């Protein structure tokens, strides 16, 4: 497969993974905020991608408000979503790759700029906890595949066999019938949880965890576990995290780009827009895929921007945890 074909197939995979998320629309309505405010100041604040960010934010904020550490907060936040077997884009309930195998990617950064990540992990319920252990217990930043699984087991984590849920098994069987993709413009390409938190002192940490694209090539890894791509945090400035078609985020290191733009004076919203504009500029097929980005700065201000309409995010700040629609490049 040449590079161009791969890009266009990847866009189709991303589009295809939107299928099966009908239930999300009603949950979206339930949690909907009245307006998209992104100039709120002050911490603590937790922000995360998509409607599954609502329970993740709750868990993270609970840790922060009870005096827990920032890194505990972000880890425990996304663990809620990793545990949800009905979530088809994060954790072991995620859609499998072409071979019917679920492979998981995750990354974490703490308030001191430490980072850990894992990629291509099978059978572990909480890849984010392996990523955290890589950060805290090894001199490394990233472990992949069998090595990451061995490390997880050495820490007492159980490795489960690859068993699809009823939902993902059915969807994979359906996909196998044709093994091909239809280019659908993403309206709501729900994938991945990226979560950023700032404590009352202005320190920032973040996480990103995903099962990646549905029906991906076995071995494919996206942006989520790559520091600077799916996640970047620098407590001197703030943090950013991405969701959507990972290949485009990898090519532009969009989270790092957004944080560096904030370092140079951009607001979080401006930084998010600059990052999406860069992705648009570098991808002539930008109408075929979705990317969403979130950013926060040390003042507790946030930004959110999608390439396509349909990207939403959960914001927990000033005692309320609500879902908001991000503005987007394509209207
Ligand atoms: N953004 C998730 C992925 O592309 O794997």
Image (cartoon, rainbow, N blue to C red):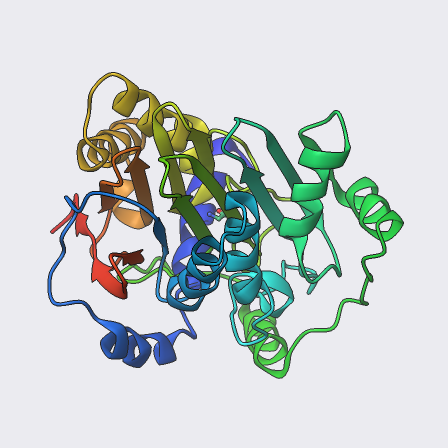
Q: Residue placed at 35% from the left, 78% from the top?
A: 22
Q: Quadrant of the N terminus?
A: top right
Q: Is residue 62 above or below residue 303?
A: below
Q: Residue 148, percent across and down?
A: 78, 43
Q: Residue furthest front?
A: 67
Q: Which is nearer the eye, 306 or 5?
A: 306
Q: Residue 73, percent across and down?
A: 51, 52
Q: Residue placed at 43% from the left, 68% from the top?
A: 55
Q: Is residue 220 above or below residue 264?
A: below
Q: Which is nearer the eye, 298 or 328?
A: 298
Q: Quadrant of residue 41?
A: top left
Q: Residue 292, percent across and down?
A: 32, 47
Is 330 left or right of 79, judged from the image as shown? left
User: Residue 101, can we see it?
Assistant: yes
Q: Which is nearer the eye, 311 or 125?
A: 125
Q: Residue placed at 70% from the left, 35% from the top?
A: 136
Is 146 left or right of 200, judged from the image as shown? right
Q: Which is nearer the eye, 220 or 193?
A: 193
Number of numbered discs overlaid on the protein picture: 0
Q: Residue placed at 55% from the left, 34% from the top?
A: 226
Is 37 left or right of 244, judged from the image as shown? left
Q: Quadrant of residue 174?
A: bottom right
Q: Is residue 249 above or below residue 76?
A: above
Q: Is residue 103 above or below residue 54?
A: above
User: Residue 5, can we see it?
Assistant: no
Q: Residue 8, percent across and down?
A: 41, 44
Q: Quadrant of residue 277?
A: top left
């Amino acid at each position: 497969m040449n590079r161009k074909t791969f890009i266009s197939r990847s866009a189709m995979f991303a589009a295809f993974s939107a299928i099966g998320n009908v239930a999300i629309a009603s949950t979206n309505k339930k949690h909907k905020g009245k307006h998209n405010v992104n100039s709120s100041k002050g911490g603590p604040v937790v922000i995360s991608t998509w409607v599954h960010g609502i329970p993740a934010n709750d868990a993270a904020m609970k840790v922060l408000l009870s005096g827990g550490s920032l890194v505990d907060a972000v880890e425990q936040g996304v663990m809620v979503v990793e545990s949800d077997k009905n979530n088809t884009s994060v954790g072991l309930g995620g859609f499998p790759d072409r071979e019917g195998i679920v492979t998981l990617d995750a990354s974490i950064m703490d308030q001191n700029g430490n980072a850990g990540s894992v990629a291509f992990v099978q059978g572990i319920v909480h890849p984010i906890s392996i990523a955290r252990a890589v950060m805290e217990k090894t001199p490394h930043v990233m472990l992949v595949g069998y090595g990451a699984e061995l490390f997880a087991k050495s820490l007492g984590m159980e490795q489960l066999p690859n068993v699809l849920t009823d939902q993902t098994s059915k969807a994979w069987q359906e996909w196998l019938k044709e093994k091909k993709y239809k280019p659908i413009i993403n309206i709501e390409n729900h994938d991945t949880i990226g979560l950023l938190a700032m404590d009352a002192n202005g320190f920032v940490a973040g996480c990103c965890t995903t099962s990646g694209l549905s029906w991906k090539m076995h071995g494919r890894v996206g942006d989520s576990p790559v520091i600077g791509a799916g996640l970047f945090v620098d407590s001197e400035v703030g943090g950013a995290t991405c969701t959507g078609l990972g290949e485009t985020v990898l090519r532009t290191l969009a989270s790092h780009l957004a944080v560096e733009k904030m370092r140079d004076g951009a607001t979080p919203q401006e930084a998010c827009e600059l990052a999406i504009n860069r992705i648009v500029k570098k991808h002539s097929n930008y109408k075929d895929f979705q990317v969403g980005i979130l950013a926060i700065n040390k003042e507790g201000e946030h930004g959110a921007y999608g390439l396509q309409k349909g990207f939403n995010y959960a914001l927990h700040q000033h005692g309320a945890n609500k879902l908001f629609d991000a503005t987007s490049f394509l209207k």
